[in-house]
Image: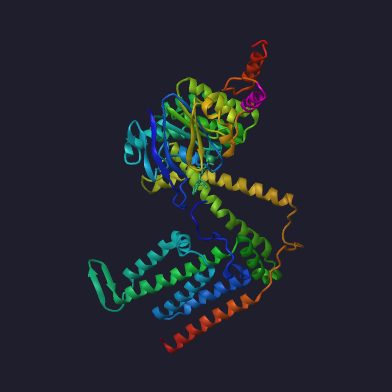
Amino acid sequence: MPITFDHVTYSYPSSCEPALRDISFTIEDGEFLGIIGHTGSGKSTLIQHINGLLLPSKGSVLVDGMDIASNRVARRDTRRKVGLVFQYPEYQLFADTVKADVGFGPRNLGLGEEEIITRVRQALARVGLSYEECAEKSPFDFSGGQRRRIALAGILAMQPSVLVLDEPMAGLDPRGRENIMRFICSLHEEGMTIVMVSHNMEDVAVHATRVITLKKGEILMQGTPREVFSHPKELRDVGLGVPLATAFATELNECGFALPAGIFTLEELADAVAAELGGVVS
Amino acid sequence: MGNLILGQYCPGTSVVHRTDPRIKLFLVIFYLALVFVAPGFSGLAVVTAFTCLIIFFAKIPFRTILNSIKPLLFIVIITALINLFFVHSGEAVVDWMFFTITTGSIYMAIFLSWRLALLLFGMSLLTLTTSPIDLTDGAEHLMRPFERIGFPAHEFAMMMGIALRFLPVFMDEAAKIKKAQEARGADFESGNFITRGKSIIPILVPLFVSAFRHADELAMAMESRCYHGGVGRTRMHVLAIKNHDYAAIAVFAVALACLIVMRVVGL
Ligand SMILES: Nc1ncnc2c1ncn2[C@@H]1O[C@H](COP(=O)(O)OP(=O)(O)O)[C@@H](O)[C@H]1O
Ligand SMILES: [Mg+2]
Protein backbone atom coordinates (compact mmCIF):
# COMPACT_ATOMS: atom_id res chain seq x y z
CA MET A 1 0.00 0.00 0.00
CA PRO A 2 2.37 2.75 -1.14
CA ILE A 3 1.34 6.25 -0.03
CA THR A 4 2.32 9.00 -2.44
CA PHE A 5 2.42 12.73 -1.77
CA ASP A 6 2.03 14.55 -5.05
CA HIS A 7 2.94 18.25 -4.83
CA VAL A 8 1.09 18.71 -1.55
CA THR A 9 0.64 22.25 -0.29
CA TYR A 10 -1.32 22.98 2.86
CA SER A 11 -2.27 26.19 4.69
CA TYR A 12 -4.14 26.26 7.97
CA PRO A 13 -7.39 28.18 7.59
CA SER A 14 -6.30 30.75 10.14
CA SER A 15 -2.96 31.65 8.59
CA CYS A 16 -1.92 32.77 5.12
CA GLU A 17 1.60 31.33 5.23
CA PRO A 18 1.43 27.70 4.02
CA ALA A 19 2.57 25.14 6.59
CA LEU A 20 3.54 22.71 3.80
CA ARG A 21 4.82 23.67 0.37
CA ASP A 22 4.96 21.45 -2.68
CA ILE A 23 5.80 18.21 -0.88
CA SER A 24 6.36 15.13 -3.05
CA PHE A 25 7.57 11.73 -1.87
CA THR A 26 6.39 8.15 -1.53
CA ILE A 27 6.17 5.91 1.51
CA GLU A 28 7.05 2.42 0.29
CA ASP A 29 5.84 -0.78 1.93
CA GLY A 30 8.05 -2.02 4.73
CA GLU A 31 10.32 0.98 4.93
CA PHE A 32 11.27 2.93 8.04
CA LEU A 33 10.95 6.60 7.16
CA GLY A 34 12.44 9.12 9.55
CA ILE A 35 11.22 12.73 9.42
CA ILE A 36 13.39 15.41 10.96
CA GLY A 37 13.10 19.18 11.04
CA HIS A 38 13.15 22.15 13.33
CA THR A 39 10.12 22.93 15.54
CA GLY A 40 7.46 24.48 13.35
CA SER A 41 8.88 23.06 10.14
CA GLY A 42 5.63 21.21 9.44
CA LYS A 43 6.37 17.64 10.56
CA SER A 44 3.13 17.20 12.50
CA THR A 45 1.15 18.83 9.71
CA LEU A 46 2.76 16.47 7.20
CA ILE A 47 1.96 13.25 9.03
CA GLN A 48 -1.68 14.23 9.51
CA HIS A 49 -1.98 14.10 5.73
CA ILE A 50 -0.95 10.45 5.66
CA ASN A 51 -4.34 9.26 6.89
CA GLY A 52 -6.48 12.13 5.67
CA LEU A 53 -6.99 13.97 8.97
CA LEU A 54 -5.88 17.02 7.03
CA LEU A 55 -6.54 17.31 3.32
CA PRO A 56 -4.15 19.14 0.99
CA SER A 57 -5.04 22.66 -0.14
CA LYS A 58 -3.23 21.89 -3.39
CA GLY A 59 -1.90 18.62 -4.76
CA SER A 60 -3.00 15.20 -3.59
CA VAL A 61 -2.21 12.24 -1.37
CA LEU A 62 -2.58 8.94 -3.21
CA VAL A 63 -3.04 5.62 -1.43
CA ASP A 64 -2.87 2.66 -3.79
CA GLY A 65 -3.21 5.22 -6.54
CA MET A 66 -6.48 6.65 -5.21
CA ASP A 67 -6.83 10.25 -4.09
CA ILE A 68 -8.01 10.16 -0.48
CA ALA A 69 -9.34 13.71 -0.63
CA SER A 70 -12.00 12.95 -3.22
CA ASN A 71 -12.62 9.30 -2.39
CA ARG A 72 -14.44 8.80 0.93
CA VAL A 73 -14.14 5.02 0.86
CA ALA A 74 -10.41 5.21 0.24
CA ARG A 75 -10.09 7.66 3.11
CA ARG A 76 -11.91 5.33 5.50
CA ASP A 77 -9.77 2.41 4.43
CA THR A 78 -6.66 4.48 4.91
CA ARG A 79 -7.73 5.48 8.43
CA ARG A 80 -7.96 1.77 9.26
CA LYS A 81 -4.64 0.82 7.76
CA VAL A 82 -2.62 3.78 9.00
CA GLY A 83 -2.18 3.96 12.75
CA LEU A 84 -1.35 7.52 13.79
CA VAL A 85 0.25 8.05 17.19
CA PHE A 86 0.18 11.72 18.11
CA GLN A 87 2.70 13.45 20.29
CA TYR A 88 2.05 12.69 23.98
CA PRO A 89 -0.59 10.06 23.12
CA GLU A 90 -1.16 9.37 26.81
CA TYR A 91 -3.13 12.63 27.03
CA GLN A 92 -5.83 11.11 24.84
CA LEU A 93 -6.73 8.28 27.20
CA PHE A 94 -10.32 8.66 28.33
CA ALA A 95 -12.04 5.39 29.26
CA ASP A 96 -12.48 4.15 32.82
CA THR A 97 -10.59 0.91 32.18
CA VAL A 98 -7.52 0.06 30.15
CA LYS A 99 -9.57 -2.59 28.37
CA ALA A 100 -12.17 -0.07 27.19
CA ASP A 101 -9.54 2.43 26.10
CA VAL A 102 -7.42 0.01 24.10
CA GLY A 103 -10.64 -1.47 22.70
CA PHE A 104 -11.93 1.92 21.53
CA GLY A 105 -10.32 1.65 18.09
CA PRO A 106 -11.37 -1.95 17.38
CA ARG A 107 -14.90 -1.11 18.57
CA ASN A 108 -15.03 1.77 16.11
CA LEU A 109 -14.01 -0.71 13.42
CA GLY A 110 -17.22 -2.56 14.24
CA LEU A 111 -15.60 -5.78 15.46
CA GLY A 112 -17.34 -8.31 17.67
CA GLU A 113 -16.84 -8.37 21.44
CA GLU A 114 -14.69 -11.52 21.41
CA GLU A 115 -12.43 -10.24 18.65
CA ILE A 116 -12.03 -6.97 20.54
CA ILE A 117 -10.90 -8.79 23.70
CA THR A 118 -8.44 -10.88 21.68
CA ARG A 119 -6.98 -7.78 20.08
CA VAL A 120 -6.74 -5.90 23.37
CA ARG A 121 -4.96 -8.88 24.90
CA GLN A 122 -2.51 -9.09 21.99
CA ALA A 123 -1.86 -5.36 21.86
CA LEU A 124 -1.20 -5.12 25.59
CA ALA A 125 1.15 -8.11 25.44
CA ARG A 126 2.88 -6.44 22.51
CA VAL A 127 3.72 -3.33 24.57
CA GLY A 128 4.80 -5.46 27.50
CA LEU A 129 1.77 -5.19 29.76
CA SER A 130 -0.22 -8.10 31.11
CA TYR A 131 -3.92 -8.20 30.28
CA GLU A 132 -4.76 -9.92 33.56
CA GLU A 133 -3.07 -7.22 35.62
CA CYS A 134 -4.08 -4.12 33.69
CA ALA A 135 -7.34 -4.71 31.88
CA GLU A 136 -9.72 -3.63 34.64
CA LYS A 137 -7.59 -0.81 36.07
CA SER A 138 -8.04 2.84 35.21
CA PRO A 139 -5.46 4.07 32.70
CA PHE A 140 -4.93 7.07 34.98
CA ASP A 141 -3.47 4.80 37.69
CA PHE A 142 -0.35 4.13 35.63
CA SER A 143 2.92 6.03 35.38
CA GLY A 144 3.63 8.32 32.44
CA GLY A 145 5.71 5.79 30.53
CA GLN A 146 3.17 3.02 31.08
CA ARG A 147 0.34 5.28 29.95
CA ARG A 148 2.17 5.95 26.74
CA ARG A 149 2.47 2.20 26.18
CA ILE A 150 -1.27 1.81 26.82
CA ALA A 151 -1.95 4.55 24.27
CA LEU A 152 0.34 2.76 21.79
CA ALA A 153 -1.55 -0.47 22.44
CA GLY A 154 -4.74 1.42 21.56
CA ILE A 155 -3.36 2.05 18.09
CA LEU A 156 -1.83 -1.43 17.65
CA ALA A 157 -5.18 -3.00 18.50
CA MET A 158 -6.44 -1.63 15.20
CA GLN A 159 -3.76 -3.74 13.49
CA PRO A 160 -2.53 -1.06 11.10
CA SER A 161 -0.09 -1.91 8.35
CA VAL A 162 1.53 1.53 8.54
CA LEU A 163 2.43 3.05 11.90
CA VAL A 164 3.04 6.80 12.04
CA LEU A 165 4.56 8.20 15.23
CA ASP A 166 4.98 11.88 16.14
CA GLU A 167 7.96 12.23 18.47
CA PRO A 168 7.15 8.98 20.28
CA MET A 169 10.00 9.38 22.77
CA ALA A 170 9.36 12.99 23.82
CA GLY A 171 9.42 13.46 27.58
CA LEU A 172 10.51 9.94 28.51
CA ASP A 173 13.54 8.95 30.59
CA PRO A 174 16.45 7.14 28.86
CA ARG A 175 15.15 3.69 29.71
CA GLY A 176 11.65 4.56 28.52
CA ARG A 177 13.08 5.92 25.28
CA GLU A 178 15.11 2.79 24.71
CA ASN A 179 12.11 0.56 25.37
CA ILE A 180 9.92 2.44 22.90
CA MET A 181 12.67 2.55 20.28
CA ARG A 182 13.33 -1.17 20.56
CA PHE A 183 9.62 -1.80 20.34
CA ILE A 184 9.25 0.29 17.18
CA CYS A 185 12.19 -1.55 15.61
CA SER A 186 10.69 -4.93 16.35
CA LEU A 187 7.45 -3.84 14.68
CA HIS A 188 9.46 -2.79 11.65
CA GLU A 189 11.30 -6.12 11.55
CA GLU A 190 7.93 -7.87 11.49
CA GLY A 191 7.14 -6.02 8.30
CA MET A 192 5.21 -2.99 9.48
CA THR A 193 5.86 0.25 7.60
CA ILE A 194 7.07 2.89 10.06
CA VAL A 195 7.04 6.66 9.75
CA MET A 196 8.68 8.34 12.72
CA VAL A 197 9.11 12.02 13.53
CA SER A 198 12.03 12.44 15.89
CA HIS A 199 14.40 15.02 17.29
CA ASN A 200 16.94 12.37 18.13
CA MET A 201 19.35 12.22 15.19
CA GLU A 202 20.99 9.04 16.47
CA ASP A 203 17.74 7.09 16.48
CA VAL A 204 16.86 8.24 13.01
CA ALA A 205 20.37 7.61 11.66
CA VAL A 206 20.60 4.11 13.06
CA HIS A 207 17.11 2.78 12.50
CA ALA A 208 15.55 4.63 9.57
CA THR A 209 15.97 3.29 6.05
CA ARG A 210 15.20 6.71 4.60
CA VAL A 211 15.18 10.23 6.00
CA ILE A 212 13.23 13.33 5.00
CA THR A 213 14.40 16.72 6.25
CA LEU A 214 11.88 19.54 6.40
CA LYS A 215 12.64 23.23 6.41
CA LYS A 216 9.81 25.75 6.75
CA GLY A 217 7.31 23.39 5.16
CA GLU A 218 9.56 22.30 2.30
CA ILE A 219 11.62 19.17 1.79
CA LEU A 220 15.25 20.18 2.22
CA MET A 221 16.84 16.76 1.72
CA GLN A 222 15.72 13.19 1.38
CA GLY A 223 17.68 10.00 1.07
CA THR A 224 19.33 7.30 3.13
CA PRO A 225 20.66 8.35 6.55
CA ARG A 226 24.16 8.08 5.11
CA GLU A 227 23.33 10.58 2.37
CA VAL A 228 21.46 13.02 4.58
CA PHE A 229 23.89 13.05 7.49
CA SER A 230 26.86 13.63 5.20
CA HIS A 231 25.66 17.26 4.97
CA PRO A 232 26.32 18.46 8.52
CA LYS A 233 26.52 22.10 7.47
CA GLU A 234 23.12 22.21 5.79
CA LEU A 235 21.61 20.40 8.77
CA ARG A 236 23.15 22.84 11.23
CA ASP A 237 21.78 25.74 9.17
CA VAL A 238 18.23 24.55 9.80
CA GLY A 239 18.83 24.03 13.51
CA LEU A 240 19.48 20.30 13.35
CA GLY A 241 22.61 18.34 14.07
CA VAL A 242 24.22 15.07 13.14
CA PRO A 243 24.78 12.14 15.48
CA LEU A 244 27.64 12.71 17.92
CA ALA A 245 29.75 9.90 16.45
CA THR A 246 29.26 11.30 12.93
CA ALA A 247 30.36 14.77 14.01
CA PHE A 248 33.40 13.31 15.76
CA ALA A 249 34.36 11.25 12.69
CA THR A 250 34.07 14.37 10.52
CA GLU A 251 36.43 16.25 12.83
CA LEU A 252 38.89 13.37 12.86
CA ASN A 253 38.85 13.33 9.06
CA GLU A 254 39.62 17.03 9.03
CA CYS A 255 42.71 16.20 11.09
CA GLY A 256 43.98 13.69 8.59
CA PHE A 257 42.03 10.50 9.29
CA ALA A 258 40.32 8.71 6.44
CA LEU A 259 37.24 7.27 8.18
CA PRO A 260 34.42 6.01 5.96
CA ALA A 261 31.12 7.89 5.72
CA GLY A 262 28.01 6.61 7.51
CA ILE A 263 29.30 6.29 11.05
CA PHE A 264 26.35 6.85 13.40
CA THR A 265 27.07 5.04 16.66
CA LEU A 266 29.93 5.02 19.12
CA GLU A 267 30.62 1.32 18.35
CA GLU A 268 30.95 2.01 14.64
CA LEU A 269 33.23 4.95 15.39
CA ALA A 270 35.44 2.89 17.70
CA ASP A 271 35.71 0.14 15.13
CA ALA A 272 36.54 2.57 12.32
CA VAL A 273 39.20 4.33 14.38
CA ALA A 274 40.66 0.99 15.49
CA ALA A 275 40.79 -0.22 11.89
CA GLU A 276 42.45 3.00 10.79
CA LEU A 277 45.11 2.71 13.48
CA GLY A 278 45.65 -0.96 12.81
CA GLY A 279 44.07 -2.12 16.07
CA VAL A 280 41.64 -4.89 16.90
CA VAL A 281 38.15 -4.58 15.44
CA SER A 282 35.49 -6.18 17.61
CA MET B 1 -2.59 29.45 17.24
CA GLY B 2 -6.09 28.60 16.25
CA ASN B 3 -8.76 31.03 15.11
CA LEU B 4 -9.08 34.32 16.83
CA ILE B 5 -12.08 34.01 19.08
CA LEU B 6 -14.13 36.31 21.22
CA GLY B 7 -11.97 37.04 24.22
CA GLN B 8 -8.70 36.99 22.38
CA TYR B 9 -6.29 39.89 22.50
CA CYS B 10 -4.84 41.38 19.32
CA PRO B 11 -1.75 43.32 20.45
CA GLY B 12 -1.24 46.89 19.27
CA THR B 13 -0.26 50.38 20.34
CA SER B 14 -3.23 52.42 19.10
CA VAL B 15 -4.93 54.98 21.28
CA VAL B 16 -7.75 52.50 21.88
CA HIS B 17 -5.23 49.95 23.08
CA ARG B 18 -3.66 52.49 25.40
CA THR B 19 -6.88 53.70 26.97
CA ASP B 20 -7.03 52.90 30.67
CA PRO B 21 -8.77 49.52 31.11
CA ARG B 22 -11.01 50.90 33.87
CA ILE B 23 -12.21 53.61 31.53
CA LYS B 24 -12.64 51.10 28.74
CA LEU B 25 -14.81 48.84 30.87
CA PHE B 26 -16.84 51.89 31.89
CA LEU B 27 -17.13 52.98 28.26
CA VAL B 28 -18.38 49.55 27.24
CA ILE B 29 -21.32 50.09 29.56
CA PHE B 30 -21.67 53.51 27.96
CA TYR B 31 -21.65 51.81 24.58
CA LEU B 32 -24.46 49.49 25.66
CA ALA B 33 -26.43 52.59 26.55
CA LEU B 34 -25.72 54.04 23.09
CA VAL B 35 -27.02 50.93 21.37
CA PHE B 36 -30.16 50.77 23.46
CA VAL B 37 -30.95 54.46 23.29
CA ALA B 38 -30.57 54.56 19.51
CA PRO B 39 -34.05 55.09 18.04
CA GLY B 40 -34.76 53.23 14.83
CA PHE B 41 -32.50 52.72 11.85
CA SER B 42 -31.16 56.26 11.81
CA GLY B 43 -29.93 55.89 15.38
CA LEU B 44 -28.30 52.55 14.69
CA ALA B 45 -26.64 54.07 11.64
CA VAL B 46 -25.12 56.73 13.88
CA VAL B 47 -23.89 54.09 16.35
CA THR B 48 -22.51 52.05 13.44
CA ALA B 49 -20.60 55.05 12.16
CA PHE B 50 -19.34 55.66 15.68
CA THR B 51 -18.23 52.00 15.96
CA CYS B 52 -16.40 52.25 12.65
CA LEU B 53 -14.64 55.33 13.99
CA ILE B 54 -13.43 53.34 17.03
CA ILE B 55 -12.34 50.47 14.78
CA PHE B 56 -10.43 52.97 12.67
CA PHE B 57 -8.66 54.38 15.72
CA ALA B 58 -7.96 50.90 17.07
CA LYS B 59 -6.16 50.04 13.80
CA ILE B 60 -7.56 46.54 13.82
CA PRO B 61 -8.33 44.95 10.44
CA PHE B 62 -12.06 44.67 9.94
CA ARG B 63 -11.64 40.99 9.03
CA THR B 64 -10.06 40.22 12.38
CA ILE B 65 -13.08 41.62 14.20
CA LEU B 66 -15.45 39.79 11.92
CA ASN B 67 -13.55 36.54 12.55
CA SER B 68 -13.66 37.06 16.28
CA ILE B 69 -17.46 37.34 16.38
CA LYS B 70 -18.07 34.67 13.76
CA PRO B 71 -18.78 31.92 16.32
CA LEU B 72 -21.58 34.08 17.76
CA LEU B 73 -23.11 35.23 14.48
CA PHE B 74 -25.58 32.36 14.64
CA ILE B 75 -27.25 34.12 17.60
CA VAL B 76 -27.78 37.15 15.37
CA ILE B 77 -29.21 34.98 12.63
CA ILE B 78 -31.53 33.11 15.00
CA THR B 79 -32.74 36.42 16.42
CA ALA B 80 -33.48 37.64 12.93
CA LEU B 81 -35.33 34.47 11.98
CA ILE B 82 -37.42 34.35 15.15
CA ASN B 83 -38.49 37.94 14.67
CA LEU B 84 -39.13 37.41 11.01
CA PHE B 85 -41.57 34.55 11.58
CA PHE B 86 -43.12 35.28 14.94
CA VAL B 87 -43.72 39.01 15.00
CA HIS B 88 -47.06 39.88 13.46
CA SER B 89 -47.67 43.55 12.90
CA GLY B 90 -48.20 45.76 9.89
CA GLU B 91 -49.12 44.44 6.49
CA ALA B 92 -48.51 40.88 5.43
CA VAL B 93 -45.84 40.59 2.76
CA VAL B 94 -45.66 36.82 2.49
CA ASP B 95 -48.47 34.55 3.63
CA TRP B 96 -47.76 30.96 2.67
CA MET B 97 -48.84 27.92 4.74
CA PHE B 98 -47.82 28.85 8.30
CA PHE B 99 -45.18 31.34 7.22
CA THR B 100 -46.37 34.87 7.63
CA ILE B 101 -43.94 37.67 7.10
CA THR B 102 -45.16 41.18 7.74
CA THR B 103 -43.61 44.59 7.27
CA GLY B 104 -43.39 44.84 11.05
CA SER B 105 -41.57 41.56 11.35
CA ILE B 106 -39.06 42.54 8.70
CA TYR B 107 -38.43 45.78 10.53
CA MET B 108 -37.99 44.03 13.88
CA ALA B 109 -35.74 41.34 12.42
CA ILE B 110 -33.39 43.90 10.91
CA PHE B 111 -33.51 46.24 13.89
CA LEU B 112 -32.81 43.62 16.57
CA SER B 113 -30.12 41.71 14.70
CA TRP B 114 -28.41 44.99 13.80
CA ARG B 115 -28.51 45.98 17.46
CA LEU B 116 -27.14 42.61 18.56
CA ALA B 117 -24.36 42.71 15.96
CA LEU B 118 -23.33 46.14 17.26
CA LEU B 119 -23.20 44.78 20.81
CA LEU B 120 -20.98 41.92 19.65
CA PHE B 121 -18.72 44.36 17.85
CA GLY B 122 -18.41 46.46 20.99
CA MET B 123 -17.58 43.50 23.22
CA SER B 124 -15.13 42.12 20.74
CA LEU B 125 -13.44 45.52 20.38
CA LEU B 126 -12.91 45.57 24.12
CA THR B 127 -11.24 42.17 24.28
CA LEU B 128 -9.28 42.66 21.07
CA THR B 129 -7.70 45.87 22.30
CA THR B 130 -7.23 45.01 25.97
CA SER B 131 -4.78 42.38 27.16
CA PRO B 132 -6.21 39.89 29.68
CA ILE B 133 -3.93 41.35 32.34
CA ASP B 134 -5.22 44.88 31.77
CA LEU B 135 -8.77 43.63 31.62
CA THR B 136 -8.40 41.84 34.94
CA ASP B 137 -6.74 44.87 36.45
CA GLY B 138 -9.56 47.11 35.32
CA ALA B 139 -12.24 44.70 36.50
CA GLU B 140 -10.56 44.42 39.87
CA HIS B 141 -10.57 48.17 40.29
CA LEU B 142 -14.19 48.52 39.33
CA MET B 143 -15.19 45.75 41.72
CA ARG B 144 -13.14 47.10 44.59
CA PRO B 145 -16.01 48.98 46.24
CA PHE B 146 -17.71 45.63 46.81
CA GLU B 147 -14.77 44.41 48.86
CA ARG B 148 -16.26 46.23 51.84
CA ILE B 149 -19.13 43.78 51.87
CA GLY B 150 -16.73 40.83 51.67
CA PHE B 151 -16.62 40.33 47.90
CA PRO B 152 -13.21 38.88 46.90
CA ALA B 153 -12.57 41.36 44.06
CA HIS B 154 -8.93 40.46 43.50
CA GLU B 155 -9.49 36.71 43.48
CA PHE B 156 -12.47 37.10 41.20
CA ALA B 157 -10.50 39.22 38.75
CA MET B 158 -7.60 36.77 38.85
CA MET B 159 -9.92 33.86 38.02
CA MET B 160 -11.43 35.82 35.17
CA GLY B 161 -7.97 36.60 33.81
CA ILE B 162 -6.83 33.01 34.00
CA ALA B 163 -10.00 31.81 32.29
CA LEU B 164 -9.49 34.28 29.44
CA ARG B 165 -5.85 33.31 29.16
CA PHE B 166 -6.59 29.60 28.90
CA LEU B 167 -9.58 29.72 26.59
CA PRO B 168 -7.51 29.55 23.37
CA VAL B 169 -5.28 26.87 24.91
CA PHE B 170 -8.28 24.63 25.51
CA MET B 171 -9.71 25.29 22.07
CA ASP B 172 -6.41 24.12 20.59
CA GLU B 173 -6.27 21.14 22.88
CA ALA B 174 -9.83 20.08 22.10
CA ALA B 175 -9.04 20.17 18.39
CA LYS B 176 -5.95 18.04 18.94
CA ILE B 177 -7.76 15.45 21.04
CA LYS B 178 -10.58 15.28 18.50
CA LYS B 179 -8.08 14.48 15.77
CA ALA B 180 -6.38 11.83 17.88
CA GLN B 181 -9.70 10.06 18.50
CA GLU B 182 -10.61 10.36 14.83
CA ALA B 183 -7.36 8.59 14.06
CA ARG B 184 -8.72 5.73 16.17
CA GLY B 185 -11.81 5.59 14.04
CA ALA B 186 -14.10 7.77 16.17
CA ASP B 187 -16.91 9.34 14.17
CA PHE B 188 -18.20 12.72 15.33
CA GLU B 189 -20.23 13.62 12.27
CA SER B 190 -22.87 10.95 11.87
CA GLY B 191 -25.45 9.28 14.08
CA ASN B 192 -28.47 10.58 15.95
CA PHE B 193 -28.51 13.01 18.84
CA ILE B 194 -27.73 10.43 21.53
CA THR B 195 -24.88 8.63 19.77
CA ARG B 196 -23.39 12.01 18.95
CA GLY B 197 -23.66 13.08 22.56
CA LYS B 198 -21.93 9.89 23.62
CA SER B 199 -19.23 10.28 21.02
CA ILE B 200 -18.13 13.49 22.69
CA ILE B 201 -17.00 11.66 25.85
CA PRO B 202 -13.61 10.67 24.34
CA ILE B 203 -12.97 14.40 23.85
CA LEU B 204 -14.38 15.73 27.09
CA VAL B 205 -12.60 13.37 29.49
CA PRO B 206 -9.06 14.09 28.24
CA LEU B 207 -9.93 17.79 28.07
CA PHE B 208 -10.97 17.84 31.73
CA VAL B 209 -7.95 15.82 32.73
CA SER B 210 -5.73 18.32 30.97
CA ALA B 211 -7.61 21.25 32.54
CA PHE B 212 -6.90 19.84 35.99
CA ARG B 213 -3.30 19.25 35.04
CA HIS B 214 -2.95 22.84 33.85
CA ALA B 215 -4.63 24.08 37.03
CA ASP B 216 -2.28 22.05 39.16
CA GLU B 217 0.80 23.26 37.37
CA LEU B 218 -0.36 26.85 37.38
CA ALA B 219 -1.13 26.75 41.11
CA MET B 220 2.31 25.33 41.75
CA ALA B 221 3.98 27.94 39.57
CA MET B 222 2.08 30.77 41.27
CA GLU B 223 2.82 29.47 44.73
CA SER B 224 6.49 28.99 43.99
CA ARG B 225 6.54 32.70 43.17
CA CYS B 226 4.94 33.47 46.54
CA TYR B 227 1.50 34.39 45.27
CA HIS B 228 -0.87 34.48 48.21
CA GLY B 229 -3.93 36.32 47.03
CA GLY B 230 -4.72 40.00 47.00
CA VAL B 231 -3.80 41.17 50.50
CA GLY B 232 -0.71 43.38 50.50
CA ARG B 233 0.02 42.83 46.83
CA THR B 234 1.54 45.82 45.07
CA ARG B 235 1.54 46.43 41.32
CA MET B 236 4.20 46.84 38.74
CA HIS B 237 2.03 49.01 36.51
CA VAL B 238 -0.03 51.45 38.50
CA LEU B 239 -3.04 52.56 36.51
CA ALA B 240 -3.28 56.29 35.93
CA ILE B 241 -5.89 58.20 33.97
CA LYS B 242 -4.39 60.32 31.22
CA ASN B 243 -5.68 63.03 28.91
CA HIS B 244 -6.71 60.71 26.11
CA ASP B 245 -8.87 58.83 28.62
CA TYR B 246 -10.78 62.03 29.39
CA ALA B 247 -11.04 62.65 25.67
CA ALA B 248 -12.51 59.20 25.15
CA ILE B 249 -15.14 59.83 27.82
CA ALA B 250 -15.98 63.16 26.23
CA VAL B 251 -16.39 61.58 22.79
CA PHE B 252 -18.72 58.95 24.16
CA ALA B 253 -20.70 61.55 26.09
CA VAL B 254 -21.19 63.59 22.91
CA ALA B 255 -22.33 60.49 21.03
CA LEU B 256 -24.82 59.64 23.77
CA ALA B 257 -26.08 63.21 23.84
CA CYS B 258 -26.63 63.13 20.07
CA LEU B 259 -28.62 59.94 20.29
CA ILE B 260 -30.75 61.22 23.16
CA VAL B 261 -31.52 64.34 21.17
CA MET B 262 -32.40 62.22 18.14
CA ARG B 263 -34.72 60.18 20.30
CA VAL B 264 -36.42 63.17 21.89
CA VAL B 265 -36.82 65.00 18.61
CA GLY B 266 -38.12 61.74 17.15
CA LEU B 267 -35.83 61.36 14.16
N1 LIG C 1 -3.81 24.22 14.29
C1 LIG C 1 -3.02 25.12 13.69
N2 LIG C 1 -3.53 26.30 13.23
C2 LIG C 1 -2.75 27.19 12.60
N3 LIG C 1 -1.44 27.03 12.38
C3 LIG C 1 -0.86 25.90 12.82
C4 LIG C 1 -1.61 24.89 13.50
N4 LIG C 1 -0.77 23.87 13.81
C5 LIG C 1 0.45 24.23 13.36
N5 LIG C 1 0.41 25.44 12.75
C6 LIG C 1 1.54 26.15 12.12
O1 LIG C 1 2.02 25.34 11.06
C7 LIG C 1 3.44 25.29 11.07
C8 LIG C 1 3.93 23.87 11.19
O2 LIG C 1 3.58 23.36 12.44
P1 LIG C 1 3.81 21.84 12.87
O3 LIG C 1 3.38 20.97 11.76
O4 LIG C 1 3.16 21.64 14.19
O5 LIG C 1 5.40 21.80 13.02
P2 LIG C 1 6.33 20.73 13.76
O6 LIG C 1 5.49 19.54 14.11
O7 LIG C 1 7.40 20.46 12.79
O8 LIG C 1 6.86 21.41 14.98
C9 LIG C 1 3.89 26.19 12.23
O9 LIG C 1 4.25 27.43 11.69
C10 LIG C 1 2.67 26.31 13.10
O10 LIG C 1 2.63 27.57 13.72
MG1 LIG D 1 5.09 18.69 16.00
Judging depth in this view, the residue of A252 and A132 nearest the camera is: A252
Q: Main secondary structure of the magenta part?
A: helix
Q: Which residues are magenta?
A: A245-256
The spot of residue A92 in percent (x, y) is 52, 39
**Camera-side residue of B54 and A281:** A281
Quarter residue B163 falls in = bottom right
Q: Is residue A251 magenta?
A: yes
Residue A275, relative to residue B187: is it above or below?
above
The number of numbered discs placed on residues in the rendered structure image is: 0
For the C terminus of chain B, which image quadrant? bottom left
Q: Nearer the viewer, residue B246 or B149?
A: B246
The answer to whether residue A122 is left or right of residue B101 is right
From where the camera sits, is residue B145 visible?
yes
Q: How is the image coloured?
A: rainbow
Relative to A242, B228 lies left or right: right
Is B159 positioned to the left or the right of A26 in the image? Answer: right
Q: Residue at x 51, y 65 (%)?
A: B60
Identify whether A268 is placed above or below A14. Answer: above
Which residue is the extreme one toward the front? A256
Residue A77 x %, y %: 36, 33
A221 drawn magenta: no
Q: Is residue A131 visible?
A: no
